[in-house]
Amino acid sequence: MEGKYIRTRIEEHVGYIEIGKPKANTYDLEMMRELSGAIDEMRFDDSATLVVLASTVPGFFSAGADIEMLKASAPDFKAMFCLYCQETLDKIAKTPKVVIAALSGHTVGGGLEIALACDLRMMAADSGKIGLPEVTLGVLPGTGGTQRLPRLIGTSRALDMMITGKLLTPAEALAVGLVNYVYPKESFGHDVHAYASALARGPIRAVSLIKRSVAEGVEEPLTSGLALERELQNRLFITEDAKEGLASFVEKRKPNFKGR
């Protein structure tokens, strides 16, 4: 895909969705439509076993929604736009493939909400700030922020971030569990790809079903979550990778996973 703002590519079975909208990857309806299409493309492309969502704009992952566009829009359009954005980000969260947000610069407002819909977040050191400052505009984080951030870092800490609009450094974000890894700025792209490609070479069916078990199970009572876990485990037991993994352990050798 080669859109106006978003392009896709695949490298070593890692699918990349790269956002490039000057000057700060602020999104409007056109960009969200392209993002939705890119997600669909990666879902159905078997050569991409997991996905990295990244930016090609220096200094920014995304500064969120286009404020000038919102200011000029009618209330009904704003409501429909927020709904469409929520639906698009929900597609990321529900995609069977693991999605990694590569945060190479400022990640604020709706930009963080995009990252929160991903499964993992990795940020470059000394690259910018991260947070949900919508309260400083007199509004709330309306693209999943009020729901996903508390589930990730806890209600009290998330509430403090949102009602004050405070922004965190990458190191602070790592300390509170908002990002999973902080890599050196100079090797950021290489480090993210190394992590992703290692997963892509592994038992990717197990990786996918672990995502599903966690994402769906945490929203259910424990008994229902355990039932889902058993069902997914039984699906994995009959795969070639599971047979290879168990055999290699018994035979004391490195497994040769094939993603089947």
Image (cartoon, rainbow, N blue to C red):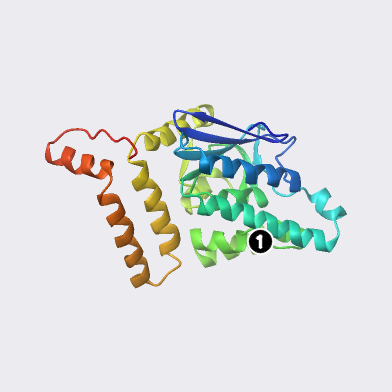
| Residue at horizontal 44 percent and vertical 28 percent from the top | 12
Across and down, in percent, residue 23 comes to 75, 36
Residue 257 quadrant: top left
Q: Which residue is mark 1?
A: 164
Q: Mark 1, residues whose alpha carbon is within 10 Å: few (<14), some, or many (≥20)? A: few
For the residue pair 10 and 24, the one nearer the viewer reads as 10
Look at the picture and state if 28 lies above or below 45.
below
In the displayed structure image, the side of residue 171 where residue 195 appears, left or right:
left
Q: Position of residue 31 (x, y in %)?
A: 71, 43
Tell me, yes or no, if residue 252 can be seen here.
yes
Q: Is residue 71 left or right of residue 255?
A: right
Picture coordinates of residue 145, whole percent (x, y)? 61, 59
Query: Does the image show residue 63?
Result: no
Secondary structure of residue under mark 1? helix
Q: Is residue 203 left or right of residue 100?
A: left
Residue at (53, 37) in percent of width and height: 125
Relative placement, left or right, of 106 versus 97 is: right
Above or below residue 142? Residue 97 is above
